[in-house]
Amino acid sequence: MTRPCPAGCVTCSALNGCLSCKPRLFFHLELDGMRQRGTCLSSCPRGHYGMRSPHISTCTRCKEDCASCFSENFCTHCHPGHFLFQGKCENNCPNGLTANAALRECTECSTGCEMCVRRNMCVRCKADLYFHQGQCHLTCPMGFEPDVQLLQCIPQVHCEVGEWTDWGPCIRRRSMRTYRRGEEMRTRKVLRSPSVYGDPCPHVSEIKKCVTKKKSKSPSRL
C-alpha cells in the first residue's frame, strides 16, 4: 500500500520526501541526517527567505552574515559580530551610529555625538562641541571649562595662595622726601596657578608706610 504524502505535498517519495507542493506553499530542503528531504511550508524557516514563481515557490538561504532576511539583499537580523544597517549586516557601524551588541543593530548616538558605545555614552563629539562624561556639550557645565585642543570639558582650577610672610624691614627710598619715612613689604606664594577660566590669583605682595629706626650714634672717643 502506498503511503500518503506529508501534509502540503502534491507529489513525494519515501526517499526524498516532498517533490512538489500545493499552491502558496514553499518547497524547502532540510537535512535528515546526511540526506536532504523536501518539505512544504507556509513560511520559510529562520535563515531563509521565500521566492515565489508561477511554477514553484522555494525557500532560499540568506546571505552568510544574515541570521534572517526578507529577501536576498535585505537582512532583518544578523549573526553575532555583525550589526544591521539599512538591511545589511556590517562588521562596523558608520560614524554617528553605535554598534548595539544586544540588538545586533547600528543605533543612533545622542545629539552631537559622532561616535558612541551606546546611545547615551558618547566617545567622540562633533566639531565645536566638548566631551564631558559621555555627553557632548556646546558649553561646559558649571565647575568645568573647555579645552580647545582636546575638545573636552576639564575641571576648573582656582588660584590658591599661601599665608602672608612677616613684614620686612622698613626701607627708606631715595625718592621719599620725608625724613625717616619708609616702606615695608610682605608677600605670599602662589600654591596653585589658575586655569584659563578659574578664579585669578589675588595680590601676592603688600606694601605699607613705616618709620625707619633712628640710627644710634657711635660712642665718642676720649
Image (cartoon, rainbow, N blue to C red):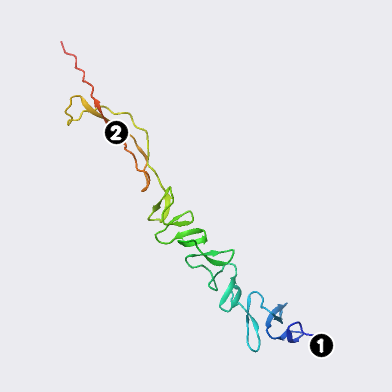
Marks 2 and 1 close (CB-CB < 8 Å): no
Q: Residues within 10 Å of mark 2 (few under 14, many from 20)?
A: few
Check the image and report above or below for 220 versus 196: above
Placement of 207 over or under 220, stated as above or below? below
x, y percentage for residue 84? 55, 70
In the image, what residue type sits under mark 1? Thr
- 170 and 130: which is toward the camera: 130
Q: In which quarter of the image is residue 127?
A: bottom left
The disc labelled 2 sits on which kind of residue? Glu
Residue 32 point in image, percent of width and height? 73, 78
Residue placed under numbered mark 1 in the picture: 2
Q: Which of marks 2 and 1 is in front?
A: 2
Q: Where residue 214 sits in the image (x, y, percent)?
A: 21, 20
What element does badge 1 sit on? loop
Gap in Å between the C-alphas at discs 2 and 1?
Answer: 116 Å
Left or right for 109, reference 13: left
Q: Mark 2 points at which residue?
A: 206
Q: Where is residue 102 in the image (x, y as percent from the top left)?
A: 59, 63
Q: Which residue is drawn at 33% across and 29% down?
A: 166
